[in-house]
Image (spheres, rainbow, N blue to C red):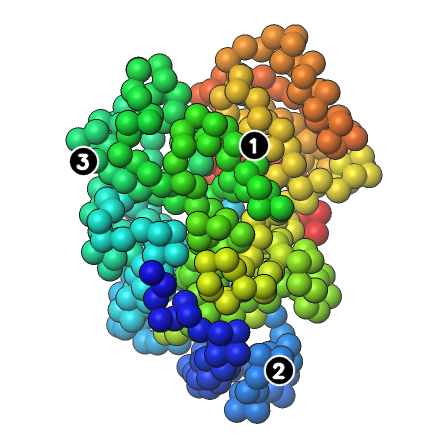
Amino acid sequence: MMLAIDKLSSREIKSLQEIKLKQLLNYVDQHSPYYSAIFKDNDIKAEKISTLDELERIPTTSKEDLQIHNMDFLCVPRQKVTEYTTTSGTLGTPVTIALTKNDVQRLAYNEYLSFHCAGASSKDIFQLALTLDKQFMAGMAYYLGALRLKAGVVRTGPGAPSMQWETISRVKSTSLVVVPSFILNLIEFALDNKICLADSPVKRAICIGENVRNESFEYNTIGKRIKDLWNIELFSTYASTEMQTAFTECRHGAGGHLHPELLIAEVLDDDGRPVGIGDRGELTITTLGVEGMPLVRYRTGDICAIYDSPCNCGRSSIRISPILGRKKQIIKFKGTSIYPSVIYEILNGNSNIIDYVLEVSSNELDTDDIAIWIAARDNSEKLISKLISYLHASLRVMPKIIFSEIETIKQKQFSGFGRKPQRFIDKRTTNSI
């Protein structure tokens, strides 16, 4: 059953967002040192902007702006801050995001909506197989969202397949919040230890951090591998610490649904102009209802497409495609532009590969070099030949392949600041974009 907010028509959503946009712009003009300066420098009168179309008059905010002027985005006195979180630092210096008590409640509401979109209810028991410490906003959001849903929660954290399965068996967990590649580890452990997947109480997985679908909304390699072995429902999600909001699929799997009362979403080209429906561009967001550190036209760096046709679930909110890549992770290799996700898809499709890291560096010609570090079960000539064939067929160029021990791969994945493994390591002297 849909919530009342999910039943709004496109026209009602637009009206709601324009009311909230006016409130936001007046708020940041009065309380945000960063945005009040931006408005003044660009002769922008907050009270004169009243429609979504007029939002384009405001300059976009970049990741670098947030890094350099971090605390100038804070709109409340420090004593009103309840929680300090940080971004993962995937694309550079981590950013602190401060939340008030109201922001924490908004976070819980956001994840409540997301779980509801994925068909969960108070009858579910969520097993949170993700980091719940280290200033990680997502772990807190999933926990609070499950509580608001009045569901059960068990906080196992990441890793240790044996412990995960023992908990599933003992607690009867029905829903996992988990990185998709780790689901494959759970499946492998179950098969090795004669655990019957069909008899498991788990019926869905809320997938974080990695795509399980491709641009056509079909299951990608990792999604197919999971579904072929374990017939549970998979729900893709997309979120970031900065926007304090998540996009989550419904059962129809046609893109992550926007929560329209919490976020305005645009997709822009390199010149900051909106692209057409279904066209690729950079996801740019404006937060609604955030008290501590609201953002206006924040360019996430993530590439996706927006769809606005009504979903078969009955919602009229816009949906976003799976994230197709990050602008700063585009590789210029031997005259070819490559998104890392293309390489990931090939590697994920080979069951002999345990884990991997994609390392990009600059060469003496100031172009990019690629090294793929792989931990494999069998470094045979057959595996090498297959990888070379697939990589060359997809990329038309051939990166360097280095086979290594799993310990070396893990060290590389956690070599910098961060609480989650990084499969893309950027050692370039300057970014490609």
Q: Which of 27 and 119 is in front in this view?
A: 119
When the figure is inspected, residue 433 is found, relative to residue 45, above or below; the finding is: above
Q: Is residue 389 above or below residue 323?
A: above
Which numbered dot is residue 221? 1
Which one is in front in this view, the residue at disc 3 or the one at disc 2? Answer: 3
Residue 279 appears at what percent x and percent y?
69, 58
Residue 282, percent from left and from top: 63, 59
Which residue carries the number 3 mark? 171
Per the model, the C-alpha gap separating discs 3 and 2 is 51 Å
Residue lying at 49% horizontally and 16% vertically, measured from the top left: 405
> Who comes first in sequence, dot 3 or dot 1?
3
Q: In the image shown, does 412 or 145 lie closer to the viewer?
A: 145
Q: Which of marks 3 and 2 is nearer the N terminus?
A: 2
Left or right placement of residue 232 versus residue 305 in this view: left
Residue at the spot x=65%, y=51% of the render?
A: 327
Residue 65, x across and y down, in percent: 56, 65
Q: Which mark is residue 54?
A: 2
Mark sitting earlier along the chain (1/2): 2
- Name the element at disc 3: helix
Separation of disc 3 and disc 1 at Cα? 31 Å
Quarter location, residue 24: bottom left
